[in-house]
Image: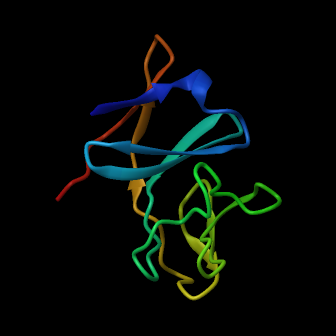
Amino acid sequence: MFLLCPLEQLVEGKSRGFQRNGIAIVAVRKNQQVYAYVNRCPHRGIPLEWQPDDFLDYSAEFIQCATHGALFSISSGECIAGPCVGQGLEPLQVSIDAQQQVWVNELDD
């Protein structure tokens, strides 16, 4: 596991990008839950955001790939619209400790 950030740095209804241990990560706090995924579109293998920390569509209901507009469920990472429907973002297991620090499990190779 590695430390992502203090929970207070993830604002409800917003997204943030991180680089940890050589992994590009997108994290979203939605309905008091934190979701984290590898920041890589399954369609092209490229980063999702237009600019730093800008991963959500205009409604803030979905993660959106800036390159081709694919929409991904925040809670599952599944692509629900776009060229990679049925595929999904690579999830990272998140835990929050008693000190309100957000931790992410290492990727399995």
82, 9: nearer the viewer: 9
Q: Which residue does the image show at 39% across and 75% down from the upper left?
A: 45
Spot occupied by residue 76 in the image (x, y as percentages of width and height): 55, 59
**Residue 37, picture quadrant:** bottom left
**Image quarter for residue 29?**
top right
Residue 99 percent across, percent down from the top left: 47, 11
Say above or below: 78 vs 25: below
Asked if residue 2 lies left or right of residue 25, the reply is left
Residue 48 coordinates in the image, percent (x, y): 53, 66
Identify the residue at the far front of this view. Answer: 51
Q: Quadrant of the N terminus?
A: top left
Picture colour scheme: rainbow
Note whether 77 is above or below 53 in the view shown: below
Name the residue located 39 percent from the left edge and 53 percent from the top edge: 24
Residue that appears at 48% across and 78% down: 87
| Residue ranking furthest to the right | 59
Tell me: residue 35, above or below residue 109: above
Q: Quadrant of the C terminus?
A: bottom left
Quarter of the figure with residue 11: top right
Looking at the image, residue 45 sits to the left or right of residue 100; the answer is left
Say which residue appears at 43% left-offset and 38% top-offset: 94
Residue 78 image point, x, y percent: 55, 69
Camera-side residue of 32 and 9? 9
| Tag count | 0
Does 9 appear above or below 28?
above
Q: Residue furthest top?
A: 99
Residue that lies at the very extreme toward the bottom in this rendered image: 83
